[in-house]
Amino acid sequence: MGSIGIIFKRELMGYFATPLAYIFIVIFLIANGIFTFELGGFFLRGQADLLPFFGFHPWLYLFMVPAIAMSLWADERKTGTIELLITLPIKLSDAVIGKFLAAWVLTGIALALTFPIWITVNYLGDPDNGVIFAAYIGSWLMAGGFLSIGSCMSACTKNSVIAFILTVSICFIFVIMGSPILLNSFPGWLPQFLVDAFSAMGFLTHFDSISKGVLDIRDMLFFTVFIGAWLTASAIVIEIKKAN
Amino acid sequence: MIEIQNLSKRFDQFTAVDNLSFTVKEGEVLGFLGPNGAGKSTTMKVITGFLAPSEGTVTIDGFDITESPIEAKSLIGYLPEGAPSYGDMTTLEFLKFIADVRGFKGEEAAVKVQRALDEVALNSVAHQTIDTLSKGFKRRVGLAQAIMHDPKVLILDEPTDGLDPNQKHHVRELIKNLAKDKIVVISTHILEEVSAVCTRAVIIAEGRIVADGTPAELEAKSRYHQAVSVRFTEQYDFSADLAGVPGVGSIEQDGEDALRFTVLAENAESIFSKVSEIAQKNSWPVDEFHVNRGQLEDLFRTVTQSGQEENNHG
C-alpha cells in the first residue's frame, strides 16, 4: 500500500470513528428526498427520469461538501499534527491526494446510498439507465470539484468555520458562473470569447449536459483538471502556511 | 551523523535561527538549551524537514533534508513540541498508522507496534481514544511513534514536559538506554535533565550558539565552579580569616539562609584544601562544608542574558 493509500485509509477511518460520516450521509439522504419529491415534483412530472433529483445536487453540494472539506487541513494545523504528518517519510502531494480521496469517497458513499431512488424510478417506469449512470458519475465528479476547492480553503486557515465560509463562497461563484442570469448581466462590449471562457468555467454548464446523459469527455476533463489544479494549489498553500 | 552548516531561518523580519553550525555524532545525547524563543524548536523543525531553511544545509547521515527529504526523514524519529497526535484514533490505531507509514507490514508491523507500546508502558491504554488520555499518556504516545522504527536519529522537543517525576525518570532511562549507537537531540529547559542524560549540551540564545560542551565542561565555566559552600551552626564572621588567601574571591551570603555562604574561587583554581585548612585552624563552627561543581543554571543565565532582553517569539 503506497502512502496515498495509507493516508486515505486513516482519513476515511477518521470520518467513521466520529459521528461526522453518519450525520453527513443521513442529512444528505433526507435533503435529497425532500428536494426530489417535494420541491422537484418527482411524481407530478409523470416522467421516468431522475432530472429533478440531479438538478438539485449543485445546490445541495454547495453546503454539504464544504462541511466535510473544512477540517481537511485546518484541523491538522490547529492541533499541530501537520508537523507530525510532514516530518513522516511521505510526500506532501501524497498526503493532499490521500486526504482528498477519503473525503471524495465519503461523498461517493452518500451518493451511492441514494440507490433506492434509482430502483423506484425503474419500478414506476422505464427510464434510460445509461443516462442515470452518467448523471451519477457527473454528480460525483462535481462533488470532487467542490471538495478540491474546500481542500485549498482549509489549507488557508486554522479555523475550520472560516474555511467553510470561504469554500461556500467560492463554490457559489463557480456554480453560478455558467448561469444565464449572470451571463446576461455582462455588459455588451465585453468580447464574446471572455464571456464564453467565463461560462465554460461554470459547474452548471458541465453538469447540465452530463445530467442529461451526455458523458462528454470534455466535461469529464474539465472536472479532472479543475480538481488537479485546486489540489496543486492546496499543496502550495500548505507549504507556505505550515509554519504559522 | 547530523551536520548543520550555516543554518539560518527567518520569518519575515524576525531571525529565529542565525547562522548555526554544529555536528552531532553517533552515541551523543545532545541537550539543546535556551530560553523560550531562543530558536530551539525552530532549529528542530528545520532538522526534521518541517520547515525549509532560509540559508544553510542540514544533512542526516549524508542525506540533505531539502534535497532527499524522504530518505532523511525515514532515519529520524521526531517528537514535536506538545506531542501532537490524531485524537480521534485509539493509541493502537495511531501506532499502526505510523507503522504503515514507516513501511512495516504484517507480522513485523505488529511486533514494532507492540515493542513501542511496551517501551513507554502504554499497554493499559492501547484501546483508548487518544483524546481521552491524560497529558502524560499523550506524551508517551508521541514518544512511542518517534521510537517505533528504531531510528538512527531521535529528535525530541521537550520530551518530559508535563510528566510527573516518575514518568520523567522513566523517559530519561529510556533515552539513556537508546543512546548507544544513536544520535539523540533533546530540547529542554530543565537543566537537571541535561546533567542526567546528556553527553553534550549546546546553549543557544537569539538563534546563536553561546555555549557548547559536555555538561561538566559547562559547569566548569560557571562562576560557582570550585566554589566552597559553608554553613555555620551560629553567626560567625569568617571574612577576616580568608582575607589575602590566594585564589579566594568574593564571598556570597545565601539569600534564604543567613548562615550559608559561598566562597567563590578565582580563575577556577581549587581552593577547597586551603579553605578547609583555615577552617580547622580557626575552628569554624561548621555544619556543612563542600565544594561546588559549578551550576549549569548560573552559566545558563550568564550566557543567555548577555544580549538583548528576551522576546517571546516561539
Image (spheres, coloured by chain):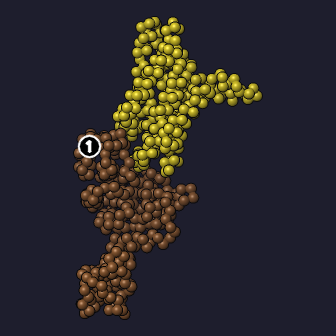
Chain colours: A yellow, B brown
Q: At which x and y percent is residue B268?
A: 36, 82
Of residues B251 and B184, the one nearer the viewer is B251
Of residues B167 and A192, the one nearer the viewer is B167
Q: Which quarter of the rendered picture does the N terminus of chain B lie within?
A: bottom left
User: What residue lies at 54% left-to-right and 16% top-to-bottom?
Assistant: A212
Secondary structure under the numbered disc 1 in the rendered image: loop
Q: Is residue A190 above or below residue B213?
A: above
Q: Determine the image quadrant of residue B204.
A: bottom left
Residue A39 appearing in the image: yes
Residue B108 appearing in the image: no
Q: Is residue B10 above or below residue B258?
A: above
Q: At which x and y percent is residue B314?
A: 47, 57
Of residues A20 and B258, the one nearer the viewer is B258
Furthest residue in direction right, as rendered: A189
Q: Amino acid at mark 1?
A: Ala
Q: At which x and y percent is residue A99?
A: 43, 37
User: What residue lies at 52% left-to-right and 39% top-to-bottom?
Assistant: A162
User: What residue lies at 75% left-to-right and 26% top-to-bottom?
Assistant: A188
The image shows a total of numbered marks equal to: 1
Furthest residue in direction front, as rendered: B235
| Residue that label 1 marks | B126
Q: Chain of mark 1?
A: B
- Left or right? Give the position of B72 relative to A156: left
- Left or right? Give the position of A130 relative to B226: right
Q: Determine the image quadrant of residue A217.
A: top right
User: What residue lies at 36% left-to-right and 34% top-to-bottom?
Assistant: A18
Q: Is disc 1 surrounded by few (<14), some (14 to 19) or many (20+) residues within 10 Å?
A: some
Q: Is residue B21 above or below residue A126?
A: below
Q: At which x and y percent is residue B191?
A: 35, 66
